[in-house]
Image (cartoon, rainbow, N blue to C red):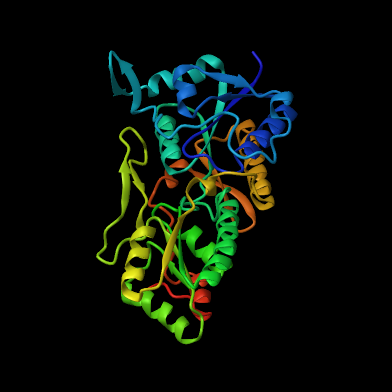
Amino acid sequence: MSKRLGILTGGGDCPGLNAVIRAAAKTAYAYGYELYGFLDGYTGVVEGRYIKLDPPAISGLLHRGGTILGTNNRSDPFHFPVQEGDKIVYRDMSGRAVELLEKLGIEVLLVIGGDGTLAGARDLKAKGARIIGIPKTIDNDLAATDQTFGFDTAVRTATDALDKLHTTAESHHRVMVLELMGRYAGWIALYSGLAGGADVILIPEIPWTVEGVIRKIEARRAEGKPFSIVVVAEGARTPTGELVVQRRVEGSVERLRLGGIGQLVAQMIEEKTGIETRVTVLGHIQRGGSPSSYDRVLATRFGVAAAELAIRGIHGVMVCLRGNDISYVPLEEVAAQPRTVPIDHPLIRTARAIGISFGD
């Protein structure tokens, strides 16, 4: 049997996934290995669905968004959905996953994902699977790496939206509220708000008040600027400390789906100021499209590093970015607390210095 590696993409989709797949495949074949891609996250490992990622299969992938392997955020092998009669029940199928990897002769499985997917990788490692993690999330909230691929593209998408919102806000003398993704971390809101010239940025890490937001908007009006731009991270809490939850999804690693804080902020602003206020929820547009040049390079570096580690016999780790260098850490260090924005982060100090309000 030829020497084989495996790869899967789990959790939410993200610009740069295909670039990782391409880089890992090219590296594997350069060392005389074959690479097999499991379909739809861990579902492919449990159900035995996979494809061979030969050179024709990876041609033209570098610039493509999404993932050719498909992904799934409800396929935890330790809590796997199984149809029994007319009901869905959840079973521990991790043993079957490990057995399939052994049966196929997969020396190491490369798992591309965020905290939920990599927590599953850590637990499969404990059952004997040989795994290397690759950090992925537009939210940039994954511990043990300085940055994840996908984040830069999401920030650019959000910044482009802010550029467009500025023109209509100024024309109509309105307040425009942009709600962005990020889960419980404010990285996307902070970076894009600073890059896109926001007047107010509301993030989960900094409690805010209605009065704090209004104070900035009124100050701008007093300066002859009758419009304002407010960026809100989906995980920002209300002034009374509550999360705004759009819905709950049973069976998903991320059961709470955040959403709606932007509408609440807009309603408060309009009621307090009388200024017409409009809301834009950017949503999944932040996940889509062609990856930026930065994300293509970072994803390629991660893919090469993961494949080379596997070929050297190193596993049970996640590749990561430390400064400008690619390194690796034990999987056990990955699924810790989310990486949130420190309140003394240099970008927060920079934003405050140029007059951006955080509503506090």
Outermost residue, front side: 172
Q: Position of residue 296 (x, y in %)?
A: 67, 46
Which of 27/338 is in front? Answer: 338
Q: Is residue 360 visible?
A: no
Instruction: Please tell me which residue is depicted at 50% across the width and 27% down the height of the picture.
Output: 40
Q: Position of residue 261 (x, y in %)?
A: 35, 58
350 displayed left or right of 179 = right
Which of 321/238 is in front? Answer: 238
- Give the quadrant of residue 5: top right
Q: Is residue 352 above or below residue 322?
A: below
Instruction: Please tell me which residue is depicted at 65% across the width and 44% down the height of the picture.
Output: 290
219 displayed left or right of 305 = left
Instruction: Please tell me which residue is depicted at 57% across the width and 35% down the height of the picture.
Output: 314
253 displayed left or right of 326 = left
Q: Position of residue 101 (x, y in %)?
A: 51, 20
- Give the quadrant of residue 279: bottom left
Q: Position of residue 244 (x, y in %)?
A: 31, 54
> Looking at the rendering, in which quadrant would you find the N terminus?
top right
